[in-house]
């Protein structure tokens, strides 16, 4: 049985929910099959000395899926990583000790006068200052947070104390590196990622209680990029392609660094406007809120999310990212690593938030990203993946594209290589989501954030509690939960009722029917005995959402109009084999927003239902560089309306998800062939 969940220790702000141990949530049904397909990718090409950013996803997938071969691979890789880091730390610590001894033997400065009041002496000492030791570069590298996170994660799954001790040593070495460098000597990317370092420190602090870790976290907070301030001001309201061409941005950054300005205006702009860093920065606001207790930090996540979506959001529930923030055009690219980082940020918010309302918001946004954007970045068997996707994607070819700085092969599907850190992390997102579908609440309670099919185990008041969730969620809202206990136990459950679930109902085996309020958590406290059941009904009526166009959602899933495609053989810029897609059917339609939506049963058992909607062909929706122009605000119909079938976004590699809005008027919709 896994250990208990770990909470924020004082003086950190208390979090409302905490993740259960890594083995506490086990997938079932369709989810188990998807995770095992992902595991096969790691097993067919086992990574040799994997990148630290690939370690944590591998551990997550192994222990969440429970795949025996994957568990053996993760154990072997983590043992190898432990040995490699141990060897590296020996030389780093030896060099660090030598530097400290050299500093101790160095003569003290003369005592005549106050150096702090002598600018000339300060300048002379600054110019004569030694370059930082070589070992500080690796200790303070932009992704140096990844190894401590992976070792801590493996410790939570196995209880192997060596891993936790190693994470502590790595974080301590980072603190010692601060003594040898000025903030200006730390890589800008490292300072932008300071929230990840703080998160790693807090994870170890909550397990060890060692107070020096909080001092290190505060040091990171001081030197890190001020993401709370940036999201509060949000200066990036315009797409980057309108502000500054990428070639000019690169030239300005180079000029800044040549002049010694390592964190100048253009360097800062390149980090804050690049969507994967911006997503990490959004997660950093949640971490800073727990560290500082500041109301401004606590509000920054919601403020930042609203501004990202207002100026750069699309139907996908994600800001555009090609790779930089690119406005609200659904034909702009969405960089897959940015999707992965946003999923991580939402999980961080869910586990750091002090209010259930903030958790509910994060959980809803998280479901949409996982079930749509993350899964759409891969082929259904996970064997091929894109570097970037589009909400409105009418072709995948190697060709000049309308983007800020994405390469011309970014939208091809290339063979998934789980050894690459970006691919590994994108694969790991589904496991990370699975393990946070249920979380621990204070007082021995459990909270359901998502109703994916799974089995949840936790020990409450010394007794094993098992909850089995039988569902086809997110495609079916009928959920049956069975509670198994040996002896009667008073248990509190918090059940999230999604915002979209109007008319939701809960029926207990006793016949009780508590009130369900969409957008909140239902608190259910009662004595459970073996065999108690809860039948939760979440109506999944298809609905239209409007913002810079319109789109269809059903439950937590985005739907899209599929475009029939012809598969082609392509090659990437480096000569690798890839799959391209070319359209065979038209895509220029407007949604008739004043006509009802309907559903059609799935063609095969286990498939999600389709949604039928009225559309009208258009004369004035053009394309540019193999992508649609922004949806026209005044669409011009080019024929009679018709009824067409929409499918879940992730199942349509070529699709239109965000449409111009039209009204039916006196026109009557005519049936058409299914697409």
Image (cartoon, grey):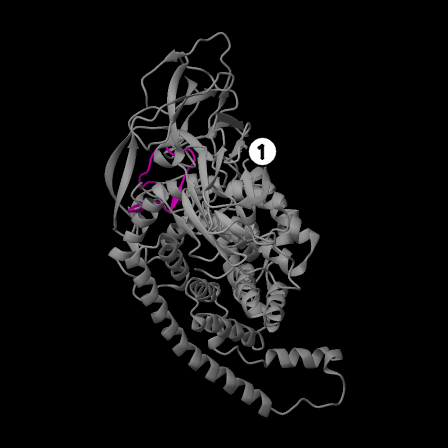
386 magenta-colored: yes
Vertical arrangement, residue 11 with respect to residue 516, above or below: below
Q: Residue at x 41, y 77 (%)?
A: 86
Say which of 53 and 365 sits in front. Answer: 365
Quarter of the image where the N terminus is located: bottom left
Vertical arrangement, residue 503 with respect to residue 399, above or below: above
| Secondary element type, mark 1 | loop
Judged from this view, the residue extending furthest toward the top is 666
- For disc 1, the marked residue is 516
493 magenta-colored: no
Tell me where residue 359 appears, x and y as whole percent.
Answer: 58, 46
Can residue 657 be seen in this snapshot? yes
Tell me where residue 605 appears, x and y as whole percent.
Answer: 30, 30
Say which of 562 and 73 sits in front. Answer: 73
Q: What main secondary structure does the magenta stretch of the protein show?
A: loop
Q: Residue at x 73, y 90 (%)?
A: 111
The magenta-colored residue range is 383-399
- Please tell me how crowded label 1 is: few (under 14), some (14-19), or many (20+) other residues with Cα within 10 Å: many
Residue 559, quarter of the rendered image: top left
Residue 412, quarter of the rendered image: top left
Tell me where residue 332 appears, x and y as whole percent.
Answer: 45, 38
Say which of 494 and 80 sits in front. Answer: 494
The total of numbered circles placed on residues is 1
Can residue 137 be seen in this snapshot? no
Tell me where residue 299 appears, x and y as whole percent.
Answer: 66, 48
Quarter of the image where the C terminus is located: top left
């Amino acid at each position: 049985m896994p250990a208990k969940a770990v909470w924020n220790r004082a003086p950190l702000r208390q979090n409302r929910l905490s993740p259960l141990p890594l083995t506490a949530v086990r997938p079932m049904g369709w989810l188990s099959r998807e995770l095992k397909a992902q595991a096969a990718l790691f097993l067919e090409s086992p990574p040799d000395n994997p990148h630290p950013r690939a370690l944590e996803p591998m551990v997550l997938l192994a222990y969440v899926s429970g795949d025996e071969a994957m568990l053996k691979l993760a154990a072997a890789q983590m043992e190898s990583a432990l040995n490699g880091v141990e060897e590296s730390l020996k030389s780093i610590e030896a060099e660090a000790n030598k530097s400290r001894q050299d500093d101790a033997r160095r003569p003290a400065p003369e005592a005549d006068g106050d150096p702090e009041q002598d600018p000339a002496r300060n300048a002379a000492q600054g110019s004569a200052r030694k370059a930082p030791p070589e070992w500080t570069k690796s200790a303070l590298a932009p992704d140096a947070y990844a190894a401590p996170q992976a070792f801590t994660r493996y410790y939570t799954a196995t209880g192997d104390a060596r891993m936790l001790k190693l994470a502590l040593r790595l974080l301590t070495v980072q603190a010692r590196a601060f003594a040898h460098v000025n903030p200006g000597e730390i890589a800008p990317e490292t300072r932008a990622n300071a929230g990840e370092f703080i998160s790693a420190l807090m994870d170890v602090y909550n397990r060890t209680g060692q107070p020096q870790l909080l001092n290190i976290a505060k040091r990171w907070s001081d030197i890190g990029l001020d993401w709370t301030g940036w999201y509060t001001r949000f200066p990036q309201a315009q797409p980057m392609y309108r502000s500054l061409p990428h070639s000019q941005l690169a030239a300005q950054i180079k000029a800044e660094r040549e002049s010694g300005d390592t964190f100048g205006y253009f360097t800062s702009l390149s980090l804050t406007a690049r969507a994967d860093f911006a997503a990490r920065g959004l997660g950093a606001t949640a971490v800073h809120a727990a560290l500082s207790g500041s109301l401004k930090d606590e509000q920054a996540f919601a403020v930042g999310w609203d501004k990202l979506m207002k100026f750069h959001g699309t139907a996908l529930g994600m800001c555009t990212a090609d790779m930089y923030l690119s406005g609200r055009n659904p034909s702009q690219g969405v960089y897959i690593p940015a999707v992965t980082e946003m999923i991580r940020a939402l999980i961080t918010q869910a586990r750091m938030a002090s209010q259930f309302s903030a958790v509910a918001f994060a959980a809803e946004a998280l479901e949409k990203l996982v079930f749509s954007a993350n899964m759409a970045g891969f082929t259904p068997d996970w064997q091929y993946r894109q570097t970037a996707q589009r909400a409105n994607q009418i072709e995948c070819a190697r060709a000049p594209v309308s983007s800020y700085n994405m390469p011309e092969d970014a939208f091809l599907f290339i063979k998934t290589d789980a050894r690459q850190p970006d691919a590994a992390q994108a694969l790991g997102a589904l496991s990370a989501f699975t393990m946070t579908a249920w979380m621990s609440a204070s007082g021995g309670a459990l909270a359901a954030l998502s109703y994916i099919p799974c089995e949840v185990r936790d020990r409450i008041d010394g007794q094993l509690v098992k909850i089995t969730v039988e569902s086809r969620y997110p495609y079916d809202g009928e959920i049956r939960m069975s509670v198994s206990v040996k002896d009667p136990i008073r248990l509190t459950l918090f059940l999230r009722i999604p915002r979209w679930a109007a008319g939701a109902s809960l029926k207990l085996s006793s016949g009780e029917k508590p009130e369900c309020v969409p957008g909140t958590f239902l608190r259910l406290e009662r004595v459970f005995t073996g065999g108690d059941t809860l039948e939760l009904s979440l109506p999944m009526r298809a609905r239209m959402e409007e913002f810079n166009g319109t789109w269809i959602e059903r439950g937590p899933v985005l739907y899209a109009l599929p475009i029939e495609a012809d598969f082609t053989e392509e090659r990437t810029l480096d000569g690798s084999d890839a799959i391209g897609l070319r359209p065979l059917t038209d895509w220029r339609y407007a949604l008739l927003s004043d006509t009802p939506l309907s559903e059609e049963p799935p063609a095969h058992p286990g498939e999600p239902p389709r949604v039928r909607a009225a559309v009208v062909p258009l004369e004035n929706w053009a394309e540019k560089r193999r992508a649609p122009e922004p949806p026209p605000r005044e669409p011009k119909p080019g024929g009679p309306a018709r009824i067409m079938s929409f499918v879940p976004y992730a199942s349509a590699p070529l699709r239109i998800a965000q449409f111009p809005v039209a009204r039916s008027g006196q026109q009557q919709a005519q049936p058409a062939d299914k697409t």
